[in-house]
Image (spheres, rainbow, N blue to C red):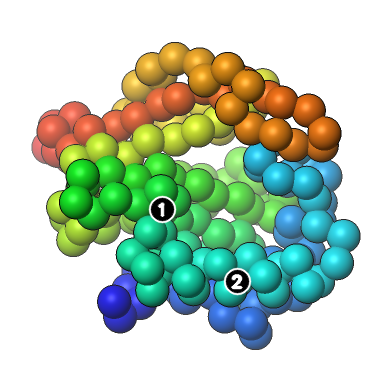
Amino acid sequence: MTFPILETKRLKLIEITHQHVDYLYEILSLEEVTRYYGTNRFTLPVEASRLIDMFHKNLVDKRGIRWGIKLKENQKFIGTVGLNALHLKNKRAEIGYELHPDYWRRGLASEAINEVIRFSFNQLDLCRIGAIVYPENEASINLLIKMGFTKEGILRGYIHQNEQFHDTSVLSILKPEWLKSQV
């Protein structure tokens, strides 16, 4: 699969390579970013390097695709967005994302997520995009609901992070719902 570069008004969604390791490490070493991320915060740059390798392997295996988010105005790498648990046969995936806190509350996450949803429904022909979110992460839940996702329920003890199990909320959007919102 050739890596699809996506663009929005303010963003360029690019393939993440090892040249981005320092930026990715900086973002995922912040407690405020990883608090609801589903993994412990990074303490070594090699963890970011391994994550980049995993992103590449998931792409090759057609199990996921993760874009780096760069600002068009200055080419600054500010986060990632992508599809996890990609099942092309069953036409579904889960969306995930994170931004450096300096770029929160500017509509950039919505812009990136909207473009990935558009690509997923139009180019990959997915039917369902899910999201797994900590119930305490109200900002993310509200963002997804605003974008047309429906809250489906709770997965009990679903994520193990920081030596404890956490419940997660499940949300989703289906292609027919998304198409109606585009009219």
Q: Nearer the viewer, residue 53 or 169?
A: 53
**Residue name at image x 49 percent, y 56 percent:** 81
**Residue name at image x 44 percent, y 51 percent:** 84
Badge 2 density bin: few <14, some 14–19, many ≥20, Cα 10 Å: many
In the picture, residue 73 is in which quadrant? Answer: bottom right
* Residue placed furthest toward the right: 43
**Residue name at image x 54 percent, y 74 percent:** 16
Give the left or right position of residue 133, taking residue 28 as reference: left
Give the left or right position of residue 171, taking residue 29 as reference: left
Q: To which residue does mark 1 refer?
A: 83
Disc 1, SS: strand
Locate residue 64, reporting x and y percent: 40, 59
Q: To which residue does mark 2 refer?
A: 52
Q: Determine if residue 27 is in view.
A: yes
In the picture, residue 74 is in which quadrant? Answer: bottom right
Residue 5 drawn above or below residue 63: below
Marks 1 and 2, the one that precedes in the sequence:
2
Locate residue 79, reporting x and y percent: 61, 60
Q: Nearer the viewer, residue 112 or 163?
A: 163
Residue 85 drawn above or below residue 134: below
Q: Determine if residue 7 is in view.
A: no
Kind of residue indicated by mark 1: Leu
Quarter of the figure that contains the N terminus: bottom left
Disc 2, SS: helix
Q: Nearer the viewer, residue 90 or 178?
A: 90
